[in-house]
Image (cartoon, rainbow, N blue to C red):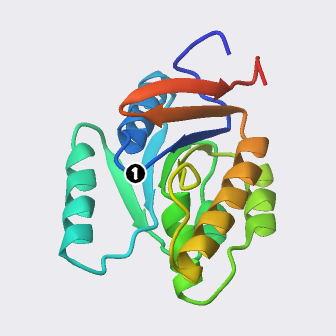
């Protein structure tokens, strides 16, 4: 990976809440789009709007995507189906894995992590997956909170093992944890 603007097939951007993960993912996608031939930018949103605070967060993320021709697909649960529809002309920013895990747990379903990894193996799009790091804070007080933390952590481990590049974002600062050249 000598050219910084060339992304591998799968990049995971990991970090805590409000750390700058999405902004970094957008920069990576737009840089790859500018150097790509006829590439299409797609924002794959997993959020569900449950309250005013979440509606405002979604609105702010939408406002970040005004400089390039972004297509938005909203899919809170059936992530594997959505990913299987992209091809090698697509640059997809998935925001976020943690929200997808949360949605499935709230729907009393288990995330299909094995199926997701299988889809990632065959997907020909350039993927940037935003992943929430939830294991660095306090132990959640509720059983559901602890289940989310553990399931999300397992998802992050599997995705980062599969990814050719992993960036960690903290307070807007990016640290590359893994690249195709250096694992």
Picture quarter containing residue 166? Answer: top right
Task: Tell me where residue 13 appears, x and y as whole percent.
Answer: 54, 40
Which residue is pictured at 63% across the width and 43% down the height?
A: 88
Lateral position of residue 68 relative to residue 180, left or right: left
Quadrant where the image shows the N terminus: top right
* Circle 1 SS class: loop
Which residue is pictured at 42% across the width and 53% down the height?
A: 43
Which residue reaches farthest top?
A: 2
Q: Is residue 41 above or below residue 82?
A: above
Task: Tell me where residue 64 appears, x and y as whole percent.
Answer: 24, 44
Q: Is residue 22 above or below residue 135?
A: above
Which residue is pictured at 51% across the width and 58% down the height?
A: 138
Task: Tell me where residue 38 appears, x and y as whole percent.
Answer: 48, 34
- Number of marks: 1
**Can residue 123 be seen by looking at this rendering?**
no
Q: Which residue is mark 1?
A: 17
Q: Is residue 148 above or below residue 5?
A: below
Lateral position of residue 54 relative to residue 15, left or right: left
Quadrant where the image shows the C terminus: top right
Which residue reaches farthest bottom?
A: 108
Query: In this orientation, which residue lies closer to the viewer: 164 or 153?
Result: 153
Query: In this orientation, which residue lies closer to the viewer: 143 or 154?
Result: 143
Lateral position of residue 34 relative to residue 69, left or right: right
Q: Is residue 21 above or below residue 118?
A: above
Task: Tell me where residue 4 appears, x and y as whole percent.
Answer: 55, 15
**Can residue 111 be seen by looking at this rendering?**
yes
Which residue is pictured at 31% across the width and 44% down the height?
A: 69
Picture quarter containing residue 14? Answer: top right
């Amino acid at each position: 990976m000598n050219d910084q603007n060339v992304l591998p097939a799968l990049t995971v951007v990991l970090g805590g809440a409000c750390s700058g993960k999405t902004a970094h993912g957008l920069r990576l996608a737009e840089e790859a789009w500018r150097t790509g031939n006829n590439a299409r930018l797609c924002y794959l949103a997993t959020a569900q709007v449950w309250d005013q605070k979440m509606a405002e967060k979604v609105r702010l993320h939408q406002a970040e995507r005004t400089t390039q021709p972004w297509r938005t697909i909203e899919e809170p649960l059936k992530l594997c189906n959505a990913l299987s529809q992209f091809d090698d002309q697509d640059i997809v920013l998935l925001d976020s894995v943690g929200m997808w895990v949360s949605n499935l747990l709230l729907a009393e379903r288990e995330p299909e992590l094995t199926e997701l990894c299988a889809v990632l193996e065959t997907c020909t799009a350039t993927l940037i997956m935003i992943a929430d790091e939830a294991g660095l804070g306090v132990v959640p007080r509720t059983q559901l909170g602890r289940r989310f933390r553990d399931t999300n952590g397992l998802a992050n481990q599997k995705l980062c093992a599969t990814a050719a590049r992993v960036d960690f974002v903290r307070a807007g600062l990016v640290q590359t944890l893994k690249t195709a050249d250096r694992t």
